[in-house]
């Protein structure tokens, strides 16, 4: 049974979501005190966090930043705010997805299932270590290491890198990436993929590899590799 922490201050909505998700055998945790989010997060040890933006004390962006400083647990934002910068900000802070209120529960369930599948299923693969441009890519640890150093990726960032590495020097369309990441691209903003790829590049820049994830305008993305490697 997966444990989900729902950081939502609307009691009616919290109980509605809890009831619906419990029907899918998820174990739901709420927040007792909104100034103790990190303590309650540590005590619950959830497998996934769903968080609203507008919260008492501090907003969801603050808590997302705090959680990301300690954990790579998947995070989905759930918010009535509809400004594009909110989605961009959530992705830049390390969130895995964004659901706009009001929402259909089938969409929320689909996104939760896809996020959990990405986060935990592929870790069981026999091959857990790959090399790319002289760097060691460890799927289980979500890290990539070369002589310059090591960077830690989120689940989405590693999934994108893994998908591109499996098709080295071949253009992977945006539609294919979105379908692979979120199962059904009709639920995904095209901007969400752009933010995730840009965030992946920024992290790879730290170890000198960002330039090797190329954008092919109007086509998609490609991870380049030197011949013979």
Image (spheres, rainbow, N blue to C red):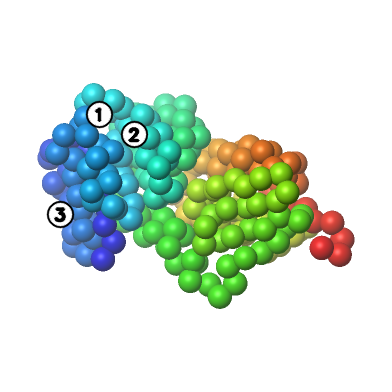
At a point 46% along the width and 35% down the height, the residue shown is 93
Residue 180 lies in quadrant: bottom right
Q: Report which residue position mark 1 lands on.
A: 55
Say what secondary structure mark 3 lies in. Answer: helix
Q: Position of residue 210 (x, y in %)?
A: 70, 42
* Residue 117 falls left or right of residue 58: right
Q: Earlier in the sequence, mark 3 or mark 1?
A: 3
**In front of the other: 180 or 75:** 75
Q: Is residue 128 visible?
A: yes
Q: Report which residue position mark 2 lands on.
A: 63
Q: How many marks?
A: 3
At a point 54% along the width and 48% down the height, the residue shown is 153
**In front of the other: 120 or 102:** 120
Q: Is residue 139 above or below residue 7?
A: below
Callout 3 environment at 10 Å: few (<14), some (14 to 19), or many (20+)? few
Q: Are marks 1 and 2 in contact (CB under 8 Å)?
A: yes
């Amino acid at each position: 049974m997966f444990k989900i922490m729902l950081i939502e201050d609307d009691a009616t909505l919290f109980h509605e979501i809890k009831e619906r998700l419990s029907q899918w055998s998820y174990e739901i945790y709420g927040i007792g005190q909104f100034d103790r989010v990190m303590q309650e997060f540590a005590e619950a040890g959830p497998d996934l966090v769903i968080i609203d933006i507008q919260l008492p004390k501090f907003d969801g962006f603050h808590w997302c930043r705090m959680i990301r400083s300690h954990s790579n647990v998947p995070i989905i934002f759930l918010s009535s705010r509809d400004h594009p910068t909110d989605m961009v900000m959530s992705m830049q802070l390390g969130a895995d997805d964004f659901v706009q209120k009001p929402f259909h529960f089938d969409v929320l369930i689909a996104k939760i299932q896809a996020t959990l599948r990405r986060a935990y299923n592929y870790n069981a693969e026999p091959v857990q270590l790959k090399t790319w441009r002289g760097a060691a890519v460890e799927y289980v640890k979500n890290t990539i290491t070369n002589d310059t150093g090591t960077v830690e990726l989120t689940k989405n960032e590693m999934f994108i890198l893994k998908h591109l590495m499996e098709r080295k020097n071949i253009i992977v369309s945006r539609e294919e990436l979105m379908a692979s990441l979120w199962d059904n691209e009709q639920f995904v903003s095209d901007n969400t993929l752009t933010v995730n790829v840009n965030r992946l590049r920024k992290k790879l820049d730290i170890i000198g590899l960002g330039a090797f994830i190329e954008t092919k305008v109007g086509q998609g993305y490609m991870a380049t590799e030197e011949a013979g490697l």
